[in-house]
Image (tube, grey):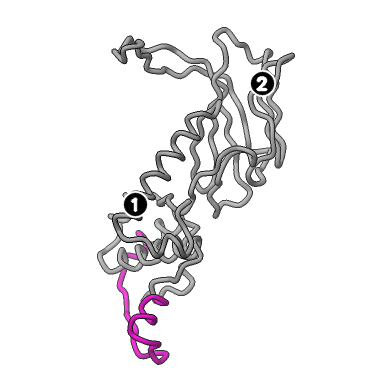
């Protein structure tokens, strides 16, 4: 993960090179796992490939508040360990399904699609305002500071409100990395301004902003000055 004082001292080119190396390392680590996973703030979805012909009754899937086990009965588990964060067991589920996977020959020429049988696991997070670094604590971590909330909904906001929300996104990421927020950076550049010297009045579409707030609970709107 690229953070800390050493990273701050790097030039722009050095930072880009470091970030690229970090992305490649992270991608390789995730590709080596016996499963794939995706997440939103509210939940995590895990896909675990299993042999063709596997039936639900052949599987041993145990979902607990802080532990996950997935495997075939009578064999070593494919996944077995402590979850990154607590989940709501009663709202978490698993199913056995098929997914189509692209298959390539040794010379990398495309051969076609094959159906891959997989265990599809849905985990409902307890804390719905926190990104997971991994699924199981003993597996490689991802850099959660690089995760960006869905930006497409920013287009629903007017220009002034969009600027306010983008500022919040930046400040949220800075806080996660232990770095100064935009206001703190401004004070460092021009000196601390007297309280109340500047104030900006916003006139957003309240309905669009409300929808955006619901879609992004990780952002703190409590200090936003909205009229």
The range drawn in magenta is 183-208
Rendered residue at 52%/15% (across/down): 117
Relative to 127, 38 lies left or right: left
Q: Does the residue at mark 1 contact the one at mark 2 (Cβ under 8 Å)?
A: no
Secondary element type, mark 2? strand
Of all residues, the one furthest to the top in this rendering is 53
Secondary element type, mark 1? loop
Disc 1: which residue: 151
Of all residues, the one furthest to the left in this rendering is 159
Image quarter where the C terminus lies is bottom left
Where is residue 160, by image quadrant?
bottom left
Rendered residue at 40%/51% (across/down): 148
Image spot of residue 78 (x, y percent)? 64, 23
The mark that comes first in sequence, 1 or 2, is 2
Image spot of residue 145 (x, y percent)? 46, 54
Image spot of residue 79 (x, y percent)? 64, 28
Where is residue 139, by image quadrant?
top right
Disc 2: which residue: 71
Q: CA distance from mark 1 to mark 2?
A: 37 Å
Vertical side of 125 occupied by 200: above or below: below
Marks counted in the figure total 2
Of all residues, the one furthest to the right in this rendering is 74
Which of these two is toward me, 128 or 187?
A: 187
**Is 100 included in the stretch rendered in magenta?**
no
């Amino acid at each position: 993960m690229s953070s800390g004082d050493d990273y701050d001292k790097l030039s722009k080119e050095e930072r880009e090179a470091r970030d690229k190396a970090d992305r490649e390392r992270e991608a390789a680590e995730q590709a080596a796992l016996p499963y794939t996973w995706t997440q939103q703030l509210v939940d995590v979805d895990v896909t675990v490939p299993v042999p063709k012909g596997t039936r639900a009754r052949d599987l041993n899937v145990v979902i607990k508040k802080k532990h996950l086990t997935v495997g075939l009965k009578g064999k070593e588990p494919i996944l077995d360990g402590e979850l990154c964060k607590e989940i709501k067991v009663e709202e978490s589920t698993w199913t056995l399904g098929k997914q189509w996977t692209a298959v390539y020959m040794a010379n990398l020429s495309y051969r076609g699609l094959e159906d891959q049988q997989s265990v599809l696991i849905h985990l409902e997070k307890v804390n719905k305002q926190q990104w997971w670094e991994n699924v199981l604590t003993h597996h490689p971590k991802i850099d959660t500071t690089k995760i960006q909330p869905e930006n497409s909904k920013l287009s629903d906001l007017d220009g002034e409100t969009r600027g306010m929300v983008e500022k919040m996104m930046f400040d949220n990421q800075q806080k996660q990395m232990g770095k100064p927020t935009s206001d703190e950076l401004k004070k460092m550049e021009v000196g601390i301004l007297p309280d109340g010297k500047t104030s900006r009045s916003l006139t957003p579409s309240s309905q669009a902003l409300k929808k955006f707030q619901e879609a992004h609970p990780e952002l703190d709107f409590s200090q936003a000055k909205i009229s």
